[in-house]
Image (cartoon, rainbow, N blue to C red):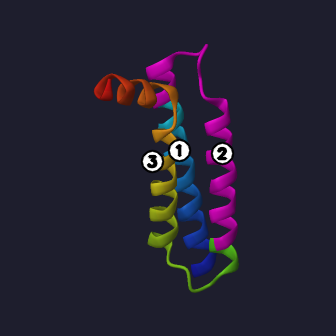
Amino acid sequence: MKKTLSTIIVAGAIVLLTATFGFAELAATGAEEFPYFQLGLLIVGGLIILSMKHRFHRMYTSEAVGAFALYTLYVSLFTNPVMDMVRHLVG
């Protein structure tokens, strides 16, 4: 039961972080320039982390949630609005 509960918690965190990414990108770029590729990368990465959490018993819930949070941050850094902001700051 403990393994199932921790897997459900990780799945909930993955869904919330992915939804937050989607909402932020939709608000920043609009529907015509939405980064579907990055959203797909987040979904696949979330499935991989979730399967690792389910498979390996010694992996803590906080480790899995933290790893996906950092992965979400790294994916969001390579979207067009963030890259445009970096271009304006540098140039």
The structure residue drawn at horizontal position 46% and vertical position 40%, both measured from the top left corner, is: 77
Q: Are marks 2 and 1 in contact (CB under 8 Å)?
A: yes
Q: Please report whichever mark, 2 or 1, sits nearer to the chain's N-terminal start.
A: 2
The structure residue drawn at horizontal position 62% and vertical position 84%, both measured from the top left corner, is: 57
Circle 2 is placed at which residue position?
A: 41
Q: Position of residue 90 (x, y in %)?
A: 31, 29
Compute the Cα span from label 1 to label 3.
Answer: 6 Å
Q: Considering the whole magenta stretch, tell me its main secondary structure.
A: helix
In the shown orientation, is residue 59 left or right of residue 40? Answer: left
Farthest left residue? 89
Q: Position of residue 91 (x, y in %)?
A: 32, 23
Circle 3 is placed at which residue position?
A: 73
Q: Are marks 1 and 3 in contact (CB under 8 Å)?
A: yes
Q: Which kind of residue does numbered mark 2 sit on? A: Leu
Compute the Cα span from label 2 to label 3.
Answer: 12 Å
Q: Is residue 12 above or below residue 59?
A: above
Farthest bottom residue? 58
Circle 1 is placed at which residue position?
A: 75
Q: Please report whichever mark, 2 or 3, sits nearer to the chain's N-terminal start.
A: 2
